[in-house]
Image (tube, coloured by chain):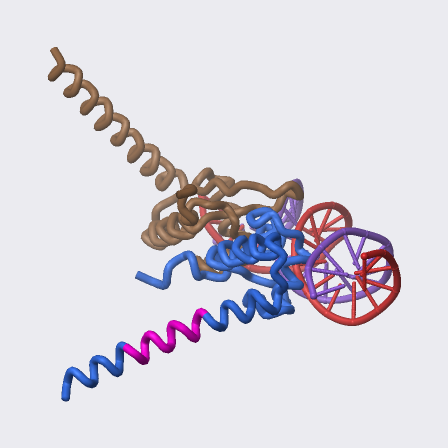
Chain colours: A brown, B blue, C purple, D red
Amino acid sequence: MSLDYKDKKVISIGIMSELTGLSERQIRYYEERKLVFPERSKGGTRKFSFADVERLVEIANKMEDGMQTFEIRKQEVKKSDVRDKMLRGQLNAAFKMRK
Amino acid sequence: MSLDYKDKKVISIGIMSELTGLSERQIRYYEERKLVFPERSKGGTRKFSFADVERLVEIANKMEDGMQTFEIRKQEVKKSDVRDKMLRGQLNAAFKMRK
DNA sequence: CGTGTAAGGAATTCTGACACG
DNA sequence: CGTGTAAGGAATTCTGACACG
């Protein structure tokens, strides 16, 4: 019932900073580099989800491993790419079975 | 792993107002009447959980039914009372079985 | 009793920029 | 490249009070 709390964008950047251990500056920068996508209130304040908390923690780990933001972004793109290909593969398989 | 997101106090009163449909005034008043228990940031701003969202929606329904805040509070107390008694009952039963 | 509102102040957040490297 | 910081302003939140009822 109702999309999970995990994906509701309701957390301000100050709380995010506490939850992730990252500075607000870092979080804003990762948004600039298209690694997270907060929503905005009417006034313009950022709103994050718990899913974003998890994502940022992962990003923080990769940064510690010396990875650069563009590499992390590439990796994410690749992942969804793989997912796309797998989906297409399954769809193809399904169609073939119907022949 | 880690206590559920549902109970994490991370939502500001403005967002709470949007999520519940209640005014900030109402939410603060219900806190004053001991119906919800937000945490506070260092600066003093309130922080609520998704569980609080659910609780406030229930409270709103009861208010619409003409119930008064003290009655709602009494009802909640009674509920935990019942739970206590049930627990005690089960504990007693368990002890008797050991005799 | 429950809620709206104006009031003044404090905490929070925002952006663009400079700095270091 | 990634992040800290000072700067000025805007959005958000806080409390105590008056009002109505």
> In this orientation, which residue lies closer to the viewer: B37 or A91?
B37
The front one of A63 and B6 is B6
Q: Residue furthest top?
A: A99
Q: Quadrant of the C terminus of chain B?
A: bottom left
Relative to B84, is D8 on the left or the right?
right
Q: Is residue B86 visible?
A: yes
Relative image position of residue A23 (x, y in whole percent): 51, 57
Residue C21 is situated, as x and y percent measured from the top left of the image, at 48, 53
User: Residue B84 at what x, y percent from top left?
Assistant: 38, 76
Residue A64 lies in the magenta stretch:
no
- Quadrant in which residue B70 is drawn: bottom right
When the figure is inspected, residue C18 is found, relative to residue A75, above or below; the finding is below
Q: Main secondary structure of the magenta part?
A: helix
Q: Is residue B66 above or below residue B99?
A: above
Which residue lies at the image location 66% right of the left edge and 43% below the top edge?
A43
Q: Of residues A83 and A64, which is closer to you in this image?
A: A83
When the figure is inspected, residue C21 is found, relative to residue B75, above or below; the finding is above
The answer to whether residue A17 shows anywhere in this view is no
Q: Residue at x 26, y 31 (%)?
A: A83
Q: Is residue B62 left or right of residue D20?
A: left
Residue B81 inside the magenta-drawn segment: yes
Q: Nearer the viewer, residue B2 or B18?
A: B18
* Quadrant of the rendered image containing residue A93: top left
Farthest bottom residue in view: B99
Name above or below for residue A24 compared with residue A85. Answer: below
Start-end of magenta stretch: B79-89
Q: Residue at x 28, y 27 (%)?
A: A84
Q: Residue at x 51, y 40 (%)?
A: A32
* Image location of residue A59, percent across then percent down: 38, 49
- The quarter of the picture where the N terminus of chain B appears is bottom left
Q: How many marks?
A: 0
